[in-house]
Image: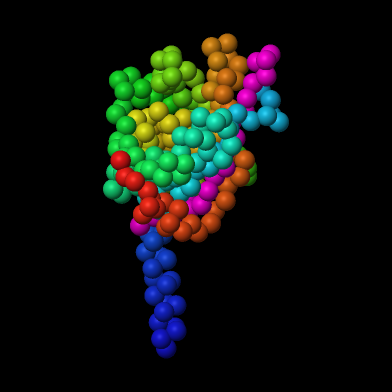
Amino acid sequence: MKFIASILCLFSFAALWQSQGKAYFEGKVIYTQLEKDRYGAMVPGRTLARTEASFKDTWYRYSVLDGSHAMLEAGDIIVNTAASTRYNVNSATYTATSLGVEPVMQGYTPIEITLMHDQDSVLGYPCRKYKVVQRAFIDGADKTSYVWAAKDLKVANLPLLAKMFGFQNTLLRNGSFGGLTLKVEVLAPDGSTALLISAVEVKPERLGDDLFQIPNSYKLK
């Protein structure tokens, strides 16, 4: 009887979880950023960077797997939207620096977001394709990009997560897409592709809480 009661309890909990709309994605997404050759063409076999985004409930972690020396030295970013905390965690210096909420710079909210295609896909995941016009924080110029957001890979507190990065995170934008961004294509003024970030692997999996915790031996700043 105890076994049956436990099973019924689990089913009830699962139903409650779904009914409250908390079926959020848990796992990791690997992205590559393609580099242009000297003629300005994208080079599929050469990557400027390979990064990893990890999600669990209200937790988010961004890591650089491969890239420039400066990118690798920068450390990881760990965010908990439930507590509005954001840290730069550096394994080389054994430090965790509180970044807080990035201020939204004037004029950096998207100027235009237009749904271009409702039935697209990336890596087999149904996606919505959007056209986005937004000022780039690097040079202050308005840039047009296309964003593919997964319909069924939901992220907890996505608008707040995007706001905590000051709307300056290329993959998060302003958090209005509702799901994980699996592809971003930023256009140059002549209409060619200036930057291409693509998910190459989506790994739904149970993640340990320790992935999102700051080690006790690290110095907090």
Residue 111 image-quadrant placement = top left
Identify the residue shown where x is 34% and y is 39%: 97
Identify the residue shown where x is 39% and y is 61%: 17
Residue 157 vertical placement versus 49 (above, below): below
Residue 21 vertical placement versus 189 (above, below): below
Residue nearer the viewer, 84 or 130? 84
Residue 153 pos. (x, y %): 49, 47
- The answer to whether any part of residue 156 appears in the image is no
Residue 31 pos. (x, y %): 57, 38
Q: Quadrant of the C terminus?
A: top left
Q: In the picture provided, is 6 more to the left or to the right than 117? A: left
Magenta span: 20-41
- Residue found farthest to the bottom: 1
29 falls in the magenta region: yes
Identify the residue shown where x is 69% and y is 25%: 43
Residue 200 image-quadrant placement = top right
Residue 210 pos. (x, y %): 43, 56
- The answer to whether any part of residue 184 appears in the image is yes
